[in-house]
Amino acid sequence: MNSNSIDTSKLLTQTNQTKGITQNADAKKAVQAVEKVASVDARTDTVELGTNTETDIGTYTIDQKKLSEIKADFSKNTAAFKKMVAVMLEKQGLKVNDAIKSLSEGKDISFTVDAGTQASAQEGISEDGYWGVDKTAERIVDFAKAVSGGDKSKIETLKNAFIDGYNQAKKSFGGELPDISQKTYDKVMEGFDNWNEAE
């Protein structure tokens, strides 16, 4: 998996040439250290859960291809959303970074959401929209499947992690989230149940 693999025999030869034969033991130690790191790098598609707790949950393989697809799709859609907001603010003479800074400092900023931006945002959170309940819940469950390698024995662990994250988000936003968030939560729970029941 390591695309920058190190040829340890070449390293040993180079070390011998530069340090001299008398330091051969040091070179062997350096090679062993590199091999140890390389063996760790080769396991980037594996997750081991429970190693720091009393219960060892096990080791399984991550679906890297699916995970990469999810990340790429999310990045593309997030960038498009950010650009839409930036264009809207800039049309009104506001700079995005200044607006974010003002908001983070608790200051009020005044802007108007134009009809085109509003329509795009509403489409995004609509029933069939990328940010809507169904597609967001589907991405969350797909992510859970990808990081677990599709191992159904991990469903409860993944479900509990999702619940914890949702509760942390609620706490961060003063204990309440918008209705769309609760609907998404319910749909994610349904997705975990459907995955568990599927053959």
Image (cartoon, rainbow, N blue to C red):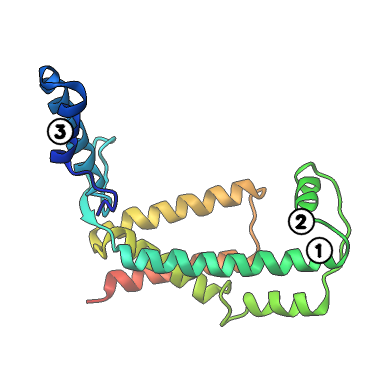
Q: In what element is the residue under mark 1?
A: helix
Eye-nearest disc, 1 or 3: 3
| Distance (Cα) linking label 2 and label 3 | 53 Å
Residue at horizontal 34%, vertical 74%? 194
Q: Amino acid at mark 2?
A: Val
Q: Position of residue 55 (x, y in %)?
A: 23, 40
Residue at horizontal 15%, vertical 27%? 16
Q: Residues at badges 2 and 3 in contact (C-beta under 8 Å)?
A: no
Q: Is residue 128 left or right of residue 153?
A: right
| Distance (Cα) linking label 1 and label 2 | 7 Å
Q: Position of residue 86 (x, y in %)?
A: 74, 63
Q: In what element is the residue under mark 2?
A: helix
Indicate whether 93 appears above or below 193: above
Judging by the rendered image, the residue that carries numbered circle 3 is 12
Q: Residues at badges 1 and 2 in contact (C-beta under 8 Å)?
A: yes
Residue at horizontal 39%, vertical 64%? 68
Total labels: the figure holds 3
Q: Position of residue 155 (x, y in %)?
A: 31, 60
Judging by the rendered image, the residue that carries numbered circle 1 is 89
Q: Position of residue 27 (x, y in %)?
A: 16, 26
Q: In what element is the residue under mark 3?
A: helix
- Does residue 188 appear anywhere in the picture? no
Q: Is residue 15 left or right of residue 76?
A: left
Mark toward the start of the polypeptide (1 vs 2): 1
Q: Amino acid at mark 1?
A: Leu
